[in-house]
Amino acid sequence: MAREKPLDLSIVSAWLAAWNESNVFSDAAVYHLQSFITDPLCLVVVTLGVGHEPRSLVFRRQKYVLPAVLLQGSPIIVPNAWKSMGLATAIEHHHAPSRRTLTARRPPKPAHLGRMQAGDITHMRSMLGDMSQNPSMFAGPAAPVAPPIGQLWHQTGEKLERVLRWDGADWVIAGYMFDSPSIMKQGAQVCNFQEALARAHASTEWFDCEFIYTYDGSTWGNA
């Protein structure tokens, strides 16, 4: 079961200072808040509404590497705009006489995600490289100096961020970094902190994570 953990107040203050109340739950604002969080796999619950009815933001953050080649001889085309929620259902299993391959397609609407079976999700995670499983990965715009063979480098600053691996002579593409929030609540309707938190906990039935980061900035809940 995921544990609740308060968002650092310095993060919340910096985030709120950058956005006015009319667009604090916009896509750009959600991406901005996510950029402050170092946990690669978590849920976030933020409720705002001092002096008026509360509105809540709930999103899942999963930062991961999509391998350039999922199976030997089976390349995958990486679209520029896949959302992490869509990615889970964007991988189909096709059985051929000689081998099992994976094919990418346009992701269906997020509502389809609820029909995934637990075994499907486990298989998906085994195929995708979770950031938490690569603690030695170097991140930065410039390559690390004197890397050992097998060193992974997350090349930041690019439109489509790459993960490269040192093969002893050159950097070769190992995969692509994805870090798009899967938004469940985005402040469109009245939703207090406890309701938003319950939604986050319910989602852990499908997606395991260690922490749910929370902030209750309303007068309706228990911060």
Image (spheres, helix red, strand yellow):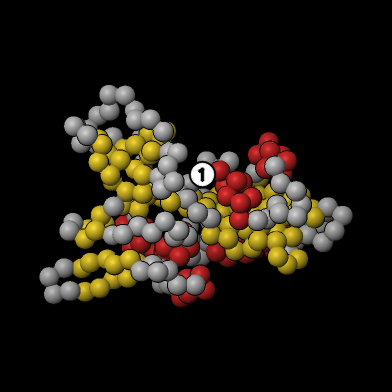
Q: Position of residue 153 (x, y in %)?
A: 34, 36
Q: Work out whether residue 54 can be spotted.
A: yes
Q: Position of residue 133 (x, y in %)?
A: 37, 45
Q: Residues within 10 Å of mark 1 (few under 14, many from 20)?
A: some
Q: Work out whether residue 194 can be spotted.
A: no
- Report the side of 22 relative to 93 (left or right): right
Residue at image point 41% right, 48% down: 160
Which is nearer the eye, 195 or 25? 25
Q: Position of residue 104 (x, y in %)?
A: 33, 66
**Outermost residue toward the front in this view:** 159
Residue at image point 61% right, 51% down: 28
Q: Disc 1 designates what residue?
A: 39
Residue at image point 73% right, 41% down: 17
Q: Count of labels shown? A: 1
What's the amino acid at mark 1? Asp
Q: Position of residue 8 (x, y in %)?
A: 65, 39
- Report the side of 182 relative to 221 (left or right): left
Name the image quarter holding residue 69: bottom left
- Report the side of 98 relative to 102 (left or right): left
Position of residue 75 relative to residue 160, above or below, is: below
Q: Secondary structure at mark 1?
A: loop
Position of residue 90 relative to residue 80, above or below, is: below
